[in-house]
Image (cartoon, grey):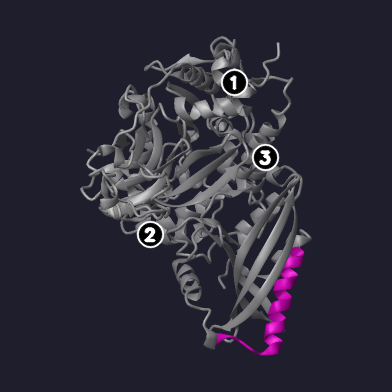
């Protein structure tokens, strides 16, 4: 039976039909009504990453973001509280903030001059004598996301009062996130500029790929060839060489934590010693010079410091929009059913306690260049493949997308001591589990609320 | 020039080199520094136009031959250019990474360039500036590049800032800075060399 495009809303769909154990229906990537429902049932109802605290370090700092398609101003208000304000004038609906990032104690609507404090509270309207109101009603204060919480600098928000706490939502994925942060001095990083990419495809195509170890040697074939073009012998183990031969027998694995979060860990392939990560780093601008300089300056301490300029070989995926890979924090943002922005925020090392013996600026100079590599030479090929999935899925009669790799093979998928699912790196179990969670969300009827200052 | 082959190792990208780059790309388009000498202007104009033609023709090895060995291709992600030691760029390639980029584009499995894009570049407003070093000049040129790829049209526009070094009778490119007017926006499949 062919499931045709709907006449009404996706409420007409049978989600047990659309998302099955081994396959999903093409409509979840191609149907406008489903996309609209996702903006509510997924992007409104779960914790969504909004910004990083290093982007708004001081009171009155703000940065624009989105919660699904809702335009949001993330502010650290004049009293130091982090808020996610709707960028939408309560008068006639215009945006009140048009700068991507900056500093403001208040936001004045350019259309009729209504002005709001960065707490969201209305500060005044022009010629108030023309209104019978006294504007004390909180309905005139900017809407804001009712629940905004941070985990170690990462700011999330949700409109769902029934959602668990952010920490409970993150659950087991906090483990790899902590490890990723803790390798840096002070257990933190600062966001800097970003490699900003986009593709003409549904947002889920990116999430589907985020823990996929199956595509690597095919989608990134040109990158693998490039990384090793000058190499021979042991040096051919650089960069993405983890994946050559059969990645399933290599010492790496993927893990599913629940709530759509998952993780791929390539670190077991590394030797456990300072400098092991640096030794497999592919070629980058300045690497030989800075390595010689740091070795001369730091001696034995140089190896551990150089590791901070190297890409940490993990993929940490927090549903629905946050991906930590290498040293990047990649944030995906739906623009429409078939357009998605993916912004790869670079991260810099912060070393307030001088744990790096004065090398922090050199390490960041290297780290900027290591980070530029994958968005330039790897991600573009993935994004092209996502776009071509969107093209292929236009074929209505060929309905199913299969994600059954690893299913039905005894002993292939196991559980760790915490009960989290573990599988070989090319397995699609992470995708099946994420889709199971997606189906649960799409069947639910979350109650979404906004808050306003009183 | 260092004693190392910049195609093999990256020794010339140092703090001093970055600092000279940042300084050289600060406040350089000053009226009093403009070179009005017709022969120099024409030599630079012809070099930039040749560069555009070689890129349109995807003669990438010939294109790179226009560059000095210790060169850079720099597409800032911020409007002001900034300091690449502290900022991620859209692209920041030294000689070796440029050769990597060309190698990848010539590889049959670079899916973002399959099919290969067709491009047409227009340059305008080429202005040449003195730097205080007789062997180095800077050039500004506005560009409009149209890309046709797999049925879609894309456009890239902004201005180039070239740093050029005297090489024999002519000039060679040391740094190409590409200032996209939308450098701080999400860009779709920027896989061609600008």
Q: Specify the segment rendered in magenta.
A: B33-55
Whole-Å distance between the Cαs marked 1 and 3? 43 Å
- Contact between labelled residues 3 and 1, with CB atoms less than 8 Å apart: no
Whole-Å distance between the Cαs marked 2 and 1? 57 Å
Q: In the rendered image, which residue does mark 2 sit on?
A: A361
Same chain under badges 2 and 1? The reply is yes
Q: Which element is circle 2 on?
A: helix
Residue A238 location (% of width, % of height): 57, 44
Q: Does residue B51 sit above or below B185 in this rendering?
A: below
Q: Does residue A136 sit above or below B56 in this rendering?
A: above
Q: Is residue B141 visible?
A: yes
Comes first in the chain, label 1 or label 3: 1
- Which residue is located at x 31 percent, y 33 percent? A146
Same chain under badges 3 and 2? The reply is yes
Q: Does B46 appear in magenta?
A: yes
Given the image, what chain letter belongs to the residue carrying mark 3?
A
Q: Is residue A247 visible?
A: no
User: What predominant SS class does the magenta segment belong to?
Assistant: helix
- Which residue is located at x 42 percent, y 44 percent? A93
The quadrant of the rendering that contains the C terminus of chain A is top left
Label 1 or label 3, whichever lies nearer to me, is 1
Q: In the rendered image, which residue does mark 3 sit on?
A: A221
Residue A199 location (% of width, % of height): 61, 42
Query: Is B155 in front, or is A196?
Result: B155
Q: Is residue A273 left or right of residue A398?
A: left
Q: In the rendered image, which residue does mark 1 sit on?
A: A8
Residue A322 location (% of width, % of height): 45, 36
For mark 1, does the 10 Å Cα neighbourhood hold few (<14), some (14 to 19), or many (20 or more) residues? few
Q: Which element is circle 1 on?
A: loop
């Amino acid at each position: 039976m062919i499931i045709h495009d709907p006449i009404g809303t996706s409420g007409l769909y049978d989600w047990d039909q659309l998302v099955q154990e081994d396959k999903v229906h093409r409509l979840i990537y191609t149907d406008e009504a489903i996309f609209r429902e996702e903006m509510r049932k997924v992007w409104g109802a779960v914790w969504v990453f909004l910004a990083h605290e290093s982007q708004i370090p001081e009171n009155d700092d703000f940065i624009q973001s989105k919660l699904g398609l809702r335009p949001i101003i993330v502010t650290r208000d004049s009293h130091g509280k982090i808020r996610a304000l709707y960028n939408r004038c309560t008068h006639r609906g215009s945006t009140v903030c048009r700068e991507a990032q900056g500093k403001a104690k208040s936001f004045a609507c350019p259309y009729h001059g209504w002005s709001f404090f960065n707490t969201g509270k209305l500060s005044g309207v022009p010629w108030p004598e023309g209104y019978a109101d006294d504007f004390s009603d909180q309905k005139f204060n900017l809407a804001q996301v009712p629940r905004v919480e941070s985990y170690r600098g990462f700011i999330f928000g949700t409109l769902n009062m029934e959602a668990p706490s952010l920490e409970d939502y993150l659950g087991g994925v906090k483990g790899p996130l902590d490890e990723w942060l803790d390798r840096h001095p002070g257990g933190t990083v600062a966001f800097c500029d970003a490699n900003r990419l986009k593709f003409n495809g549904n947002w889920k195509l990116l999430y589907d790929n985020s823990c996929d170890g199956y595509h690597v040697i095919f989608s990134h074939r040109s990158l693998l060839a490039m990384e090793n073009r000058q190499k021979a012998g042991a040096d051919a183990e650089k960069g993405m060489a983890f994946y050559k031969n059969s990645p399933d027998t290599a010492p790496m694995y993927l893990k599913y934590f629940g709530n759509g979060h998952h993780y791929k860990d390539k670190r077991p392939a590394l030797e456990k010693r300072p400098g092991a990560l640096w030794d497999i780093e592919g070629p980058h601008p300045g690497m030989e010079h800075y390595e010689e300089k740091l070795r001369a300056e730091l001696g034995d301490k140089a190896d551990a410091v150089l590791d901070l300029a190297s890409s940490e070989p993990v993929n940490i995926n927090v549903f629905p929009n946050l991906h930590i890979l290498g040293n990047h924090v990649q944030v995906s943002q739906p623009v429409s059913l078939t357009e998605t922005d993916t912004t790869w925020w670079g991260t810099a090392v912060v070393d307030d306690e001088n744990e790096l013996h004065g090398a922090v600026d050199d390490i960041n100079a290297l780290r900027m260049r290591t980070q530029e590599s994958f968005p330039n030479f790897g991600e573009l090929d993935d994004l092209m493949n996502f776009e071509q999935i969107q093209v292929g899925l236009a074929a209505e009669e060929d309905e199913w997308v299969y994600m059954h790799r690893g299913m039905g093979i005894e002993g292939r998928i196991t559980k760790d001591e915490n009960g989290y699912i573990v599988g070989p790196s090319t397995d699609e179990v992470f995708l099946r589990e994420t889709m199971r969670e997606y189906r649960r969300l799409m069947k639910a009827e979350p109650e979404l609320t906004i808050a306003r200052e009183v | 020039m260092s004693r190392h082959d910049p195609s093999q190792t990256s020794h010339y990208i140092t703090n001093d080199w970055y600092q000279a780059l940042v300084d050289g790309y600060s406040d350089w388009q000053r009226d009093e520094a403009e070179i009005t000498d017709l022969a120099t202007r024409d030599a630079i104009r012809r070099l930039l136009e040749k560069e555009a033609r070689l890129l349109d023709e995807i003669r990438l090895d010939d294109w790179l031959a226009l560059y000095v060995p210790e060169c850079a291709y720099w597409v800032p992600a911020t409007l002001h250019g900034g300091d690449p030691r502290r900022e991620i760029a859209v692209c920041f390639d030294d000689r070796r990474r440029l050769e990597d980029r060309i190698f990848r584009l010539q590889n049959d499995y670079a899916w973002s360039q399959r099919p290969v894009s067709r491009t047409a570049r227009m340059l305008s407003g080429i202005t040449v500036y003195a730097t205080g070093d007789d062997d180095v000049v800077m050039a500004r040129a506005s560009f409009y590049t149209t890309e046709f790829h797999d049925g879609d049209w894309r456009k890239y526009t902004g201005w180039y800032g070239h740093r050029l070094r005297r090489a024999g009778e002519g000039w060679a490119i040391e740094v190409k800075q590409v200032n996209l007017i939308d450098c701080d926006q999400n860009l779709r499949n920027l896989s061609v060399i600008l």
